[in-house]
Amino acid sequence: MSTTSQKHRDFVGEPMGDKSVMALSGIGGILGKKLEEQGFDKAYVVLGQFLLLKKDTEMFTDWLKDVSGANSRQAGSCAQCLKEWCDAFL
């Protein structure tokens, strides 16, 4: 299994609260701005989309790539981050 970033560990390690979309692993300034323009300004809004897709990481990564222009690595990192957060908190 690949190692996770500090950003990933920080996000998965605590409740989501009102964190910015840019707190998600794989989402930086440029992708975060694109998501905000689409109405996905908070991490919990992106989580909502992940849950609507029934926590299907493949469907979620395809959606994220379509809506933000994320590459496969970025989308996969974000999906894994949300999956692990759900496993810990839901």
Image: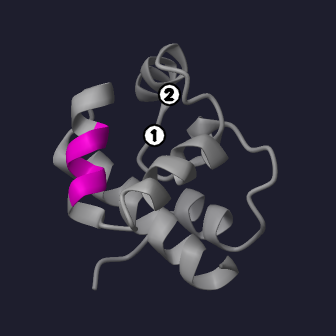
Q: Which amino acid does label 1 sit on?
A: Ile
Q: Along the line of sight, which residue is nearer the eye, 84 or 9?
A: 84
State the residue at coordinates (20%, 46%): 62
With 71 as the anchor, is 24 left or right in this view? Answer: right
Residue sitting at the far top: 37
With 55 as the anchor, is 5 left or right in this view? Answer: right
The figure's colour scheme reads: one colour
Q: Mark 1 points at which residue?
A: 27
Q: In which quarter of the image is residue 4?
A: bottom left
Q: Where is residue 36 in the image (x, y as percent from the top left)?
A: 55, 21
Segment colored magenta: 59-64
Residues marked 1 and 2 touching at CB (< 8 Å)? yes
Q: Position of residue 1 (x, y in %)?
A: 28, 86
Q: Mark 2 points at which residue?
A: 32
Q: Is mark 1 on a helix, strand or loop?
A: loop
State the residue at coordinates (59%, 38%): 21
Estimate the spatial distance between the alpha carbons at disc 1 and disc 2, rounded to whole Å.
Answer: 6 Å
Q: Does the magenta stretch mainly form a helix, a strand or a loop?
A: helix
Q: Which amino acid does label 2 sit on?
A: Gly
| Within-10-Å neighbours for mark 2: few <14, some 14–19, many 20+ | many
Q: What element carries label 2?
A: helix
| Within-10-Å neighbours for mark 1: few <14, some 14–19, many 20+ | many
